[in-house]
Image: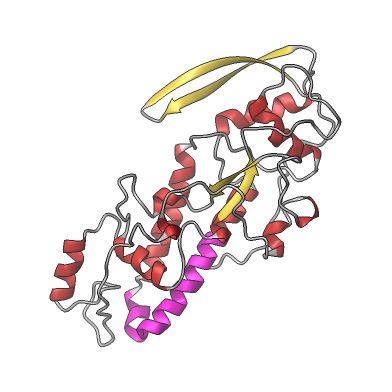
Amino acid sequence: MQLGESASFIADLQSSGKCVICDQEHKNKKTEDVKPVTESNSGWERKNMDRIFDTGDANRSSIYVGSVLPSPSTYQTEGHHCLAYSSFIKGNGEDVCLRLNFFLDQVGFAPNDAPNVIQLPGRRGPPQSPRGPWPVGVYETLKSFWVSIDQGKPLQLHVGRHNGAYFGESESVVQRLIVFASDPNKCEEETIDQFKERLKGLITGAVNYAFKCVAENTWVCHSSRLGPALSLYRLSSTEKHNFTVEAGTPSNKRTLRMSLVGYGGTGDPPPPWQTVNLITSPFV
């Protein structure tokens, strides 16, 4: 398995008599007819993930007050793929790694599955803060983030285009997943059913690891916005404070100078962030 592989490459591999999983010739070679994941499979389509969450997992739910996903009246959330959607599907809809996606689909995984989604404080705020009406002039984009701090369950904000570093972290995990899954020594000893069972465990560990990294703020989606948001939480709401943030795309970055009023929050801003107890092996 490798990133960017084409259907013709895999067809050539199969016609040469090599294993479709590890690219080697061995006694237990796998000969499955690998095909692209179809766009008709909703789990693999790019779509809005708001309010999608694995509410049946107590460890995941522990990141919210009372282990319950906040209602919009508490604070607005936006759905975020922990392992990035783009780590599996390119912008043009093609598979990043055709064989990996094919076998992940075979074992019941898709990027849009609830365990791979976390609901983060979004760009809209609730009608009022936990302490009453919002101070005049506070920045709408930061309200829900501030409420998560007020509640003692801080989660990073979700405000649009993500940092390149976040995508890099996600892609690194998927690359490691490919290496683990296509280990020729294990592949030679496994039946196809045994391989699929091992792949289930690998993708579960990868998704759990990514969820922890986002919830615990190890992977930061919007680093240039997070610093000012944390500072403004405690700063006075009766005067403006100046900040500089980056905006735009990686190829067209621009600097924005913003003058914003604070919130005057009384909670304890992170760090520390939250800790989530999930099994992530072999990803650490």
Q: Residue at x 45, y 59 (%)?
A: 43
Residue 121 seen in the current view: yes
**Count of numbered circles on the image:** 0
**Image coords of residue 96 (percent x, y):** 32, 54
Q: Which residue is nearer to you in this view: 149 or 112? A: 112
**Image coords of residue 100 (percent x, y):** 35, 65
The answer to which quarter of the image holds residue 198 is bottom left
Residue 282 seen in the current view: no
Q: Does the magenta stretch include residue 247?
A: no
Q: Is residue 236 above or below residue 204?
A: above
Q: In this view, does 159 lie to the left or right of 34?
A: right
The answer to which quarter of the image holds residue 241 is top right
Q: Which residue is drawn at 56% across and 29% down?
A: 224
Q: Is residue 127 above or below residue 18?
A: above
Q: Is residue 175 left or right of residue 12?
A: right
Instruction: Tell me which segment is drawn in magenta.
Output: 184-208
Magenta-colored segment: predominant secondary structure = helix
**Image coords of residue 126 (percent x, y):** 73, 34
Q: In this view, does 138 lie above or below 9?
A: above
**Image coords of residue 208 (percent x, y):** 57, 61
Quadrant where the N terminus is found in the figure: bottom left
| Colouring style | secondary structure
Q: Which residue is nearer to you in this view: 32 or 182? A: 32
